């Protein structure tokens, strides 16, 4: 344990990889009432190279009646990926991630 009373940010200034704590720069790009839809969109974002995370997904899955009260499942991305994420969401809405009827999904 550190004996000083310095604030945490002061302790981390000399350590660049620790100065940016997880979750500090995340912004919401979308919300879905159905967790499966949020997972699907998150997968499209991640496949496009955007580090996206879900918030409240487990809580909403626990009791789907809570989804409207909680505002659904939030998809969060780092702020510096916001424009790219919005472009992916627009492509998703246009159906650009849909598989064709003849797509081979067997994994073989």
Image (spheres, rainbow, N blue to C red):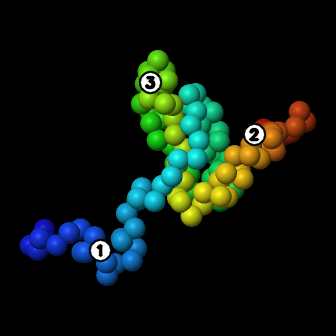
Q: Are marks 1 and 2 in contact (CB under 8 Å)?
A: no
Give residue 59's position: percent from left, percent from top: 42, 30
Can the viewer see residue 108 in this picture?
A: no
Mark 2 vs mark 3: which is more N-terminal?
3
Disc 2 target residue: 93
Secondary structure found at label 3 = helix
Give residue 82's position: percent from left, percent from top: 60, 57
Disc 3 target residue: 69
Instruction: Identify the image quadrant of the N terminus.
Output: bottom left
Q: Residue furthest right?
A: 102
In the rendered image of this protein, does residue 60 appear above or below residue 104?
above
Total labels: the figure holds 3
In the shown orientation, is residue 85 left or right of residue 93? Answer: left
Residue at 53%, 60% (x, y): give it.
Answer: 79
In the rendered image of this protein, does residue 12 appear above or below residue 53?
below
Disc 1 target residue: 12
Spatial distance from mark 2 to mark 3, Cα to Cα?
25 Å
Q: Residue furthest bottom?
A: 14
In the shown orientation, is residue 84 left or right of residue 23? Answer: right
Secondary structure found at label 1 = helix
Spatial distance from mark 3 to mark 1, Cα to Cα?
38 Å
Label placed on residue 102: none
Residue at 67%, 58% (x, y): give it.
Answer: 84
Mark 1 vs mark 2: which is more N-terminal?
1
């Amino acid at each position: 344990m550190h004996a000083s009373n310095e604030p945490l940010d002061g302790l981390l200034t000399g350590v660049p990889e620790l100065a940016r704590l997880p979750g500090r720069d995340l912004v919401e790009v979308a919300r879905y009432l159905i967790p499966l839809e949020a997972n699907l969109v998150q997968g499209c974002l991640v496949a496009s190279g955007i580090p996206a995370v879900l918030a409240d997904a487990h809580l909403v899955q626990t009791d789907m009646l809570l989804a409207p009260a909680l505002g659904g499942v939030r998809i969060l991305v780092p702020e510096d990926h916001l424009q790219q994420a919005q472009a992916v969401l627009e492509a998703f809405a246009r159906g650009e991630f849909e598989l064709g009827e003849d797509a081979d999904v067997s994994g073989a």
